[in-house]
Image (cartoon, rainbow, N blue to C red):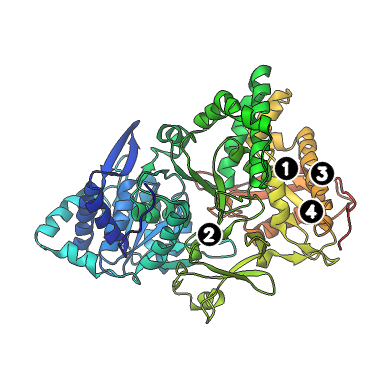
Amino acid sequence: MEYAHSAGRTFPQLLCEQARIRPKGIAWREKELGIWQETTWDRALDWVQQLAGGLAKLGVSRGDHIAIIGENRPRLYATMLAAQCLGAIPAPLYQDAVAAELVYPLQIAEVKLAVAENEEQVDKLLDIRDQLPFLQHILYHDPRGLRKAEAACLLSLDQIETEGADWWTHHSGGFDAAVKSIGTDDVAALFFTSGTTGKPKGVVHTHGSLIDRARAGAAFDRLGPQEEVLAYLPPAWIGQNIFSYAQHLVCGYTVNCPESPSTVAIDLHEIGPTYYFAPPRVFEALLTDVRVRMDDAAPPKRRLFDASLAIAQRVHAAKDNGKPPRKLDLLLLPIADLLMLAPLRNVLGMSRIRVAYTAGEAIGPELFRFYRSIGINLKQLYGSTETAVFVCMQPDNGVRSDNVGLPAPGVELRVAEHGEILLRSAGLLREYYKNPEATSEVLDADGWYHTGDAGWLEPDGQLRIIDRAKDVSALSGGALFAPKLIENRLKFFPAIKEAVAFGAGRDHVVAMINIDFPAVGSWAEKFGLPYTGYADLSGKSEVADLVAECVAKVNADLAADPHTAALQIHRFAVLHKELDPDDDELTRTRKVRRRFVAEKYGSLVAALYDPAQTHHHLSVQVRFDDGRTGTVQSDLRLRNAQVYPALRSAA
């Protein structure tokens, strides 16, 4: 069954519509103690009604902000819907944020009520409660381990549901009236940006803006109620929210919530989703695991794997280029699929995937080819919190790794003279909350949203992104310097997890590199290289040689294009610690905080630009899991990279 237009104009109306159309259809599944528990659409509506009554009894009303902090849980999604039924505004926050990071969004939104998944989130809120003058109630889902349950502000969601059911018996017709009173232009949610350059901004979205983009994406990929989705990314990230909330309510499909982050791989295999989203790092980790297993496999199995993959890649490469595949490859492909590719998809939990998306960062050509070749319809999309995700999407045919697709339905796109991407659509943010200056910077008088991304439109109409416009600068010689262009090529290698390139205003480029610990660890064990941990492994000269090979390949690739030949990396260092969100080096969505990193590692960058230095002693502050801070230090090797002459000159 393909996607059919739903009539609901708001999320509560969509819920009522789904409960009417498919009352016994499965809205949510949640794994609890190893068993999948199902919630039907009619039960979901009853659940939301009870929660809405409980919230109303606590005084929640139109315009109030309700913070939601936790993993993907049906009850938390139901609470978001309950708040929206009353005209209140859910504000999901990152569950892995430390307590101090929650203070600003809770303060600026004047949150009166917060819903916490478990003891961990409750403790964070209680620790900062004296900084939150508006916070009156903390509701919790899971009571296990609560050490401060006697706090007066604490209430269980069990109690809220019980009192909510009683509330509506004394307010007959109140629920239906509340749902009908919510309009398309009413605010539906408040999302906070990752804050790469400062404090996060609150992005205000209406029911209309989110539902418009959800419908556009559903129509583009012909989604319907038969889809199965695994919700495992942070609910505070708008991408997960669109896939497991907005499109869920538009299409009526089933959202599956893993028991915990540690069971995601198992749950993925058990559910077998048909519609799947993951950032490139997830696909990279899965491929790294496949490579490690193949390295340990018997020689006949490795040869069969390599041969099957080669056949599939030739067939799909020909199709993507609009050419007929070789007849022999077409004959051999079903055999390769039977013997190797289908079992591999099954091991990955991707046997039933019809549409898979990745976004957020560029994905490597090799990675892209691998998944598409083994029969997974992996595509890229482009969007942001401010645009409700769906700006550009790749059609099933004509998918390429170097672009992010065609403008999605309802999107008007153009490139400004200075290279910035501008767009208009019904899915744009209404404003940045309490930040009119920032709003006027991104939304002009004609309704164009200034994305801050630099790129261009290809001849076939697909969009190519090179970097954030603010990060694009120039080397001292005038060559355009886009750090992400270099960093992404480095991260395409399994041995490299993160990289930060420097070069603005300099005569050449240098880089700091994080190794991928599992991948490099497996490589080290294969060659009998002993190590005690991340810092020890990253400091090995053999690992520096391995990274040097990756850098040399990137430089060779850059040298082949006259526009990028000057961007070759001249020197690099392998860091002794991973860049970490807890150390403020990455955002919660794992984007590099460039200014902060440049300042924190300023002495290392200076050393990399000093050809006389071959080592640098670096000491940096870190935050441990228990909240304590300390320092880690190491003597880093500063390595010269292989640099190549430009292979051809610019026209």
- Judge left or right: residue 90 versus residue 173: right
- Mark sitting earlier along the chain (2/3): 2
- Residue flagged by tag 4: what amino acid is it? Val
Q: Is residue 247 rendered to the left or right of residue 377?
A: left
At label 4, counting other C-alpha atoms closer than 10 Å, the crowd grade (few under 14, some 14-19, many 20 or more) is: many
Indicate which label's residue lies in the foreground, 2 or 1.
Answer: 2
Question: Which numbered disc, 2 or 3, marks the residue closer to the eye?
Answer: 3
* Above-or-below relation of 534 to 203: above
Query: Which residue is disc 3 drawn over?
Result: 552
* Mark 3 closeness class: few <14, some 14–19, many ≥20 residues within 10 Å: some
- Taking the spot 47% from the left edge, 52% from the top edge, the residue there is 221
The amino acid beneath tag 2 is: Ser
Residue, disc 4: 510
Q: Which mark is residue 194?
A: 2
Which residue is more in the foreground, 248 or 554? 248
Q: Which mark is residue 620?
A: none
Which numbered disc, 4 or 3, marks the residue closer to the eye? 3
Q: Earlier in the sequence, mark 2 or mark 4?
A: 2
Give the CA separation, mark 2 to mark 3.
33 Å
**Disc 2 to disc 1, how far (Cα)?**
30 Å
Q: Position of residue 152 (x, y in %)?
A: 25, 55
Residue type highlighted by circle 3: Ala
Name the residue beneath numbered marker 1: 634
Amino acid under disc 1: Ser
Task: First in sequence, mark 2 or 1: give its number.
Answer: 2
Query: Looking at the image, which is closer to me, 57 or 78?
Result: 78
SS class, disc 4: strand
Q: Is residue 512 left or right of residue 78?
A: right
Contact (Cβ within 8 Å) of mark 2 with mark 4: no
Q: Residue at coordinates 49% horizontally, 59% vertically from top-left?
A: 389
At a point 37% along the width and 45% down the height, the residue shown is 255
